[in-house]
Amino acid sequence: MTLRFMSVEDMENYLAPCVQTEEKVKILDAKKLRGDPIDRLAYNAVFHEDQEQRGVTRALIKELAVQSGAVLSSIQGLYDAMGRGDVAGFTVPAVNIRGMTYDVARALFRAGLKNNSTSFIFEIAKSEMGYTKQEPAEYSVVILAAAIKEGYVGPVFVQGDHFQFNMKNFKADPKKEAESIKKLITKAVSAGFYNIDIDSSTLVDMDRPDVPSQQRDNFEQCAEMTKFIRSVEPKGITVSVGGEI
């Protein structure tokens, strides 16, 4: 059996025993879905050469994840609770997956469920998206597929790590460089990255006379990106935003 679907119709026919796709998507057999079907969906969401097929597959995985109880979420509420002292005694690891994302994410979900420690973040940096060829829309969907595979139920935290400014580009054209970061933010939030690390620390200029002037481009751009994130975040979700010094 080939992993690649020949068409959307081929995919729907294959999934028929475990997923209803006509009119409204509905999981008919969750156990069967967690077998070969979710593996094939994950494969096609990444490797299918047809863009439309990839898009349909990714949308389907997102819906199946929601129905399975794996929901892309912001970690802001947990951090707020930690700040108030309502919860304590644990840390939240963040894991950058640069390759074999489906397999690594599966292993992380398994370990979390086994140890009852499911507060963790999947993240990927702007630079890593480039050299690993993992765009936000692909990365988040593969992680959701892994959650379905392992029977994980709960919030899924996906973070854009080091959305970093390039000092050379910023000096040449500050507006253009800022717009490139905003474009990446828009893609990430649309893909369910509800946690974002803005890294404008690369703009710190140690040749300036004092700390405020050295850090000015850093904190001004970080504030501007935070404002932009607030303008594009979905209603009811407060994207967790981090910065760098």
Image (cartoon, rainbow, N blue to C red):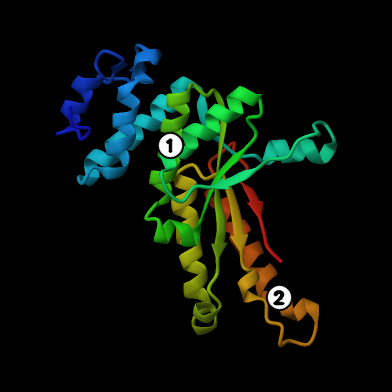
**Residue 58's disc number:** none
Looking at the image, do the residues carrying marks 1 and 2 touch, with CB atoms under 8 Å apart? no
> Does 168 appear above or below 57?
below
Q: Is residue 16 left or right of residue 153?
A: left
| Residue in the image at 29% along x and 30% along y | 40
Which label belongs to residue 103? 1
Residue at (34, 15) in percent of width and height: 32
Quadrant in the picture for residue 16:
top left
Q: Quadrant of the N terminus?
A: top left
User: Is the C terminus in the top left, top right, bottom left or bottom right quadrant?
Assistant: bottom right
Mark 1 or mark 2: which is in front? 1
Residue 35's spot in the image, x, y percent? 35, 20
The vertical placement of 79 against 218, above or below, is above
Q: Amino acid at mark 2?
A: Arg
Instruction: Give the SS element for disc 1.
Output: helix
Which residue does the numbered mark 2 point to in the structure image?
216
Disc on the earlier residue, 1 or 2: 1
What kind of element bears circle 2? helix
Q: Nearer the viewer, residue 22 or 108?
A: 108
**Horizontal arrangement in the rendering, residue 20 relative to residue 103 (left or right):** left
